[in-house]
Image (spheres, rainbow, N blue to C red):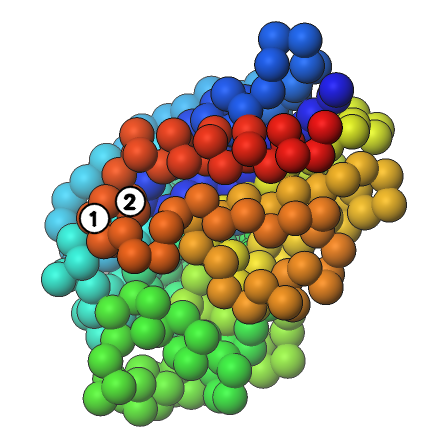
Amino acid sequence: MTALLLIDSWKGCLSSEEAEDAARQAFGPEDAVTAIPVSDGGEGFCRILTDLLGGSFRTVPCCDPLGRPILARYGIAGDRAILDTASASGLTLLAPHERNPLLASSFGTGQLLRAALQEPVRKVLVGLGGSATVDGGKGLLEAVGTIPAGIRLHGFYDTDVPFCGPGGAVEVFAPQKGATPDMMEELERRMAERKGFMEKHYGVDVTHMSGAGAAGGIGGALLALGAQLHRGISSCLDLADLPEAPDWVITGEGCADAQTLTGKVPSGVLERYRGRSRVILLAGKVRNRAALEAAGFEAVLQVTPDNLPENEALDPERTKRNIASVLRNYLLEKQ
């Protein structure tokens, strides 16, 4: 049996590498298993792409989403600098009671970007995902200022949502980042204000631009700076040395739902291997199962029991055991 593991990080629980190591335990010594860490732009993007490109890392001081001093890193690979919004502005940097998108700022990501722009590079790749912010990139623009001539910005997003308005960054992302119903109207007002600011001062209308709402609107700020935005998982898979048609392809993420099919790791993996390999989706929690199964996954497997308390569901060791056990049992049934 041949198998390929392409599993995203499980936010706040496992890295891509850790999730894939757990899935590997479901296979026997006679199986040929290849594991390639992947990211769609969120947590782990900088580390994974820098490693894929054979680069090295730089660590610099910056701010977390609430302005507290931290250290974060970006990668250098040839003429490319690589960073992600999760490293300095990430949701996992905050305790649950600290999550408040009215207060969280993308300034730290701007500091990382500013440091990367001082390197002798021609391209800067920015992963857009996993942020604690819905500030429309306000903090980032304040920290960065302008882009030096000759440097091209590229942003990589997972879920394509509008910058503001119905179905936009506030409606889709703010509740996940700690917004209460009372905060939503003010956040939407701020995003509309930011859109107008960027149109006036940068000459860019992000209303209908793909990826503008990514990372709480940081995507829109990059567009204002002249960036090109791309689907993160497609770009990551293009850089990897992928086998052509393994028997099984195992993908997954912490929570699989309707957003999974809008550009996240599992949807990109399914698109790449549909019709060539049997693709299994693993997730800690599964919602919208019918839509996921209809998309073409061989199986959609939830590894966490529904009644398990959140603190236990996020326990890394328990999650690793669950991944290995659920996948092993499914593969045994199919033999």
Identify the residue at image location x=13%, y=62%.
97
- As drawn, the residue found furthest toward the right would be 275
Q: Secondary structure at mark 2?
A: loop
Q: Which residue is mark 2?
A: 314
The answer to the question of whether label 1 and label 2 lie on touching residues, with beta carbons closer than 8 A, is yes
Looking at the rendered image, the quarter that the C terminus falls into is: top right
Residue 331 percent location from the top left of the image: 64, 31
Q: Is residue 131 above or below residue 101?
A: above
Identify the residue at image location x=45%, y=44%.
303
**Left or right of residue 127: residue 106:** left
Q: Residue 311, labelled with which disc?
A: 1
Q: Secondary structure at mark 1?
A: helix
Identify the residue at image location x=50%, y=71%.
213
Q: Is residue 52 above or below residue 223?
A: above
Instruction: Give, as a three-letter code, the residue at label 2.
Output: Leu
Residue 66 percent location from the top left of the image: 17, 58
Looking at the rendered image, the quarter that the N terminus falls into is: top right
Residue 63 percent location from the top left of the image: 22, 49
* Quadrant in the picture for residue 15: top left
